[in-house]
Amino acid sequence: MASISVEGLAKSFGRVPALLPTSFEVAPGEVFGLIGPDGAGKTTLMRLLVSLLLPDAGSARVDGLDVVKDFRELRRRVGYMPGRFSLYQDLSVRENLDFFATIFGASVAENRGLVDDLYLQLEPFEKRRAGALSGGMKQKLALCCALIHRPRVLFLDEPTTGIDAVSRRELWEMLGRLRAAGITLLVSTPYMDEASRCDRVALIEGGRILAIERPGDLAARYRYPLLAVEGGPRIALLEALRSLPQARSVYPFGSTIHFTDQRLGADPAALAAELVGALEGRGLEGLGAQPIEAGIEDVFMALAVDTRQAGEAHHG
């Protein structure tokens, strides 16, 4: 039996669709990532699955329980860490932990083994008010409170947003240990590089899931030749690339510009040489272009463009 099973789940706020009909399953003990930008529908989906919102259509089961009919029992079995720090800021670290443990009929001592790695870092500050903690420590405290009743399924909404790189790494290492302990995790993030830490990921944009794959298999979805272009005045280079008839997509990526050629099956090395020649013919100098493998960001952008174009064609 799947730990999470979603069938046609949908939600709108007034006339604005936040989540289009969505279906997927998450296996027991799996780390499943929701990857997408702000406003993609990640938080809406997560709040539906922890029974904080009622769906407009469809159904979902978490740990075998219907998220609407069985919401009381469901809340005893899941842990939820919202994207915004939602603990009691005027309570101390220890008071927050004791409070949330008491709600679930548990105790800090009883389940300390599950959160010990985090608790050891928090212990020197256990008398400090939660509102006075650093961003990274707030996230660790929130995770401790979400785990203190030993949930079977854990939902984490953008847990690494706004924290430093070291805290991000430590948090993901902790999630790996929770996975090893048999807890199913559903994690949302706007950071594409965190996809590699998940067993499978769902790319989501505009309330629609674009793809569900293992992170290593996503690149196989990218069918067109992809080139990294650099050099010359950046704005002029962007404009020149976008004006080329063979351009399928053009967008900045770090110090380079990723250019996708719409000619399927063409030799990427030959296309790179042709591209540089075409740009030099437009007065741009000192350029370089080389074929590259598509990353998750490239796949996401391509799927988003394809979905948008399909929608426009349908409504046109």
Image (cartoon, rainbow, N blue to C red):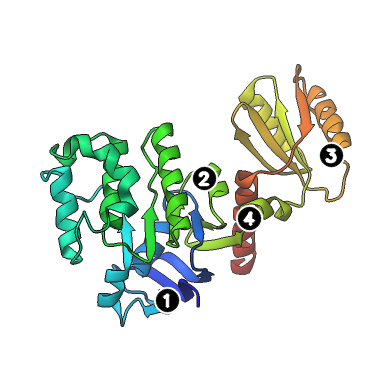
Estimate the spatial distance between the alpha carbons at disc 4 and disc 1, rounded to whole Å: 26 Å
Q: In the image, what residue type sits under mark 3?
A: Pro
Asked which secondary structure carries label 3, the reply is: helix
* Residue drawn at the location 32% of the way across and 44% of the way down: 118
Q: Amino acid at mark 1?
A: Ala
Q: 256 and 143: which one is in front? A: 143
Q: In x, y percent, where is residue 64? A: 41, 79
Instruction: Say which of marks 4 and 1 sits in front.
Output: 1
Q: Can you tell which mark lies on residue 60?
A: 1
User: Mark 2 sits on what residue?
Assistant: 194
Residue at label 3? Answer: 268
Distance (Cα) linking label 2 and label 1: 26 Å
Residue, far bottom? 69
Is residue 302 shown to the viewer in this render?
yes
Report crowding for label 1: few under 14, some 14 to 19, many 20 or more residues within 10 A (C-alpha): many
- Provide the residue designation for mark 4: 303
Q: Secondary structure at mark 2?
A: helix
Q: Earlier in the sequence, mark 3 or mark 4?
A: 3
User: In the image, 136: left or right of 24?
Assistant: left
Identified at 37% across, 76% down, the residue is: 56
Q: Label 4: state its secondary structure.
A: helix
